Amino acid sequence: MNPTIHILDLSIGYPGKKGNKIIARKLNAELFSSELTCLLGANGVGKSTLLRTLAGFQKPLSGEIRLDNQNLWNYSESQRAQRISVVLTEKIQISDLSVRELVSRGRLPYSGFWGRLSNEDSCITDEALEQVRIQAMANRQILELSDGERQKAMIAKALAQQTPVILLDEPTAFLDFPSKVEIMQLLSRLSREMQKIIFLATHDVDLAYQLADRLWLMGAHGRLTTGTPQFLAKNGDLENFFQSPDVYFNQETNHFQITTHYS
């Protein structure tokens, strides 16, 4: 299996007049096609900064991201939009927008200056709805949807963009537990069936452990550890992931558990 994305000695953060604010430095990792990879880490360690850098929304401070053996920043903005789609956590608040209209917006990188959709664009939109299995709600208004339904629509929009890479920021936030499971299973299925890199940041550690093909553990000071869930469990990296006496990884059950204290 050949890696589709390499990050090489990547340092991320924000440039400033008095010097760079470095969030994490010297990161090295790979993302593979046909795999679901989950990025885990506590708040403030730099997950969102790393995701934005991988998406091409902000430049790295040093190092590089190689997509299909080319530096990500050698692609134009429109070329990146045809290779990487992004699903963010913000809720869409536009009224009078149907699910199908939202999903069709994934075709904008291909539709030219006026944004007119061709018959091919319409067919691709329909295919995306079918792939996520939401064609029955195509004519419903976005504001009428539940959080889980809205997230499916956003994933369908990313599929309509026809990129080899899909990045998601907390796609299971605000969802009840059955909906979290459904979204994670959907992403796992799509990565395999469509041979895509699907990479997401999440706080749902147990679900990530059970459903991801690969985990990226981002710790304090930007330390990044990667591997399959089974490898990281056996190696002790998951056991040391939470720096808290109240949470531990039980290698017998393969679950994170809470230490209960009774007075």
Image (spheres, grey):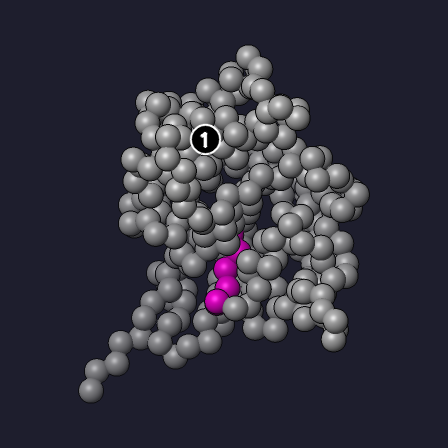
Query: As displayed, is residue 246 above or below residue 194?
Result: below
Please give the range of residues in magenta.
38-43
Give me the residue at 61% from left, 33% from top: 163
Under mark 1, the amino acid is Leu
Give me the residue at 41% from left, 34% from top: 153
Question: Could you say where residue 113 lies in the image, as x and y percent from the top left?
Answer: 66, 26
Question: Could you say where residue 2 lies in the image, as x and y percent from the top left?
Answer: 69, 40
In front: 59, or 232? 59
Image side of residue 4 versus residue 69, left or right:
left
Query: As displayed, is residue 103 above or below residue 6?
Result: above
Give me the residue at 44% from left, 48% from top: 90
**Element on which disc 1 rests:** helix
- Is 64 part of what is drawn in magenta? no
Q: Which residue is mark 1?
A: 102
In front: 178, or 118? 118
Question: Could you say where residue 140 lies in the image, as x and y percent from the top left?
Answer: 32, 27
In front: 197, or 171? 171
If the image is split into quadrants, where does the N terminus sit? top right
